[in-house]
Image (cartoon, grey):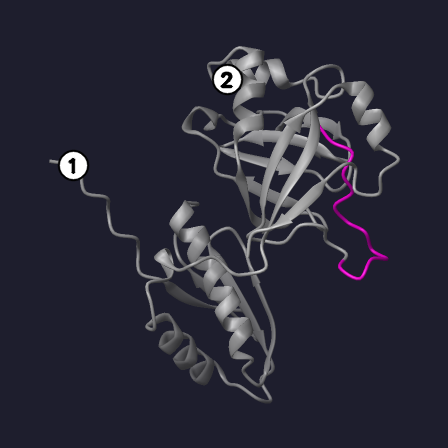
Amino acid sequence: MAEERAAPPAPVIRTVGVDGMLVSFGSRLSEPANRAALAFRAALAAESWDGVEEVSTSLVSAYVRFDLRHLDHAGLRARLESLLAQRDWYAAALPGQRRLWRIPAVFGTELAPQLPQAAAAAGMTEAEAVASLSAARVRVQTIGFAPGQPYLGELPEAWDIPRQSQLTTRIPEGALAVAIRQLVLFSVATPTGWMHAGQTAVRLFRPDAEEPFLLRPGDEVQFNAITPEELQGLRRDPLGGARAEDLS
């Protein structure tokens, strides 16, 4: 008999500060919890409740910021509970207007020097690691830490590798780093404990653009392997060679 999968936890509503509420679909990242957070956030936006000023998501939660002049805590909680009861959010369809992004990346070389370390941690050769990472089609699970910066996952189980115990002093903009079955595509240069396995030319944060963040939660991304010489040529492209197709 096939092993039965454990039922997902019941969503939890928490108060956040004076004017916020958080609806959490799990205590740790999973595909169903992330799917539920994305779908519930889209439903909240579609409701357009008077007094709701912001809706956003983290990896497994949807956040609501509201105006106390139009909504009180009890009233908003009742509305959230009613919306939660309408469907199984863990099995809900992902939001519309999603895109599949194909982004060129150099794996390894001096541009991404921690590929050997990451491959060894995953029990792979460098060639196997490149094949695995470039074959993976990952979801933008959330945007966070820096403007426009996506957390992407989940990768195959072999990539459930730890972050480093010490920080890398600087990882450049466009770096692709791996740990804990996720990829992070860095929108700014920063210290990090994630392993720098790939390098892109993509600009994720464009403050002067009509839509400043290139990627949206729910988008999917696949990285195709290129050479350092090809990457250098793509630096003249405003999107760094990234191309999107509609998934809606």
Q: Nearer the viewer, residue 107 or 50?
A: 107
Residue 100, image quadrant: top right
- Describe residue 196's horizontal placement relative to residue 122 as left or right: right
List x then y, in percent, for residue 143.
62, 51
Q: Magenta stretch?
A: 199-211
Q: Nearer the viewer, residue 135 or 47?
A: 135
Find residue 2 and name its label: 1
- Describe residue 170's horizontal placement relative to residue 15 as left or right: right
List x then y, in percent, for residue 56.
58, 63
- Describe residue 51's horizontal placement relative to residue 189 as left or right: left
SS state under label 1: loop
- Describe residue 101's horizontal placement relative to residue 211 as left or right: left
User: Residue at point 88% right, 35% down?
Assistant: 236
> Is-magenta flag for residue 18?
no
User: Residue at point 72% right, 40% down?
Assistant: 242
Q: Nearer the viewer, mark 1 or mark 2?
A: 1
List x then y, in percent, for residue 14.
44, 67
Inter-mark Cα distance, 1 to 2: 31 Å
Q: Which residue is mark 2?
A: 121
Q: Is residue 163 visible?
A: no
Q: Is residue 130 above or below residue 214?
A: above
User: Residue at point 48% right, 25% down?
Assistant: 161
List x then y, in percent, for residue 57.
55, 59
Residue type at mark 2: give it.
Answer: Ala
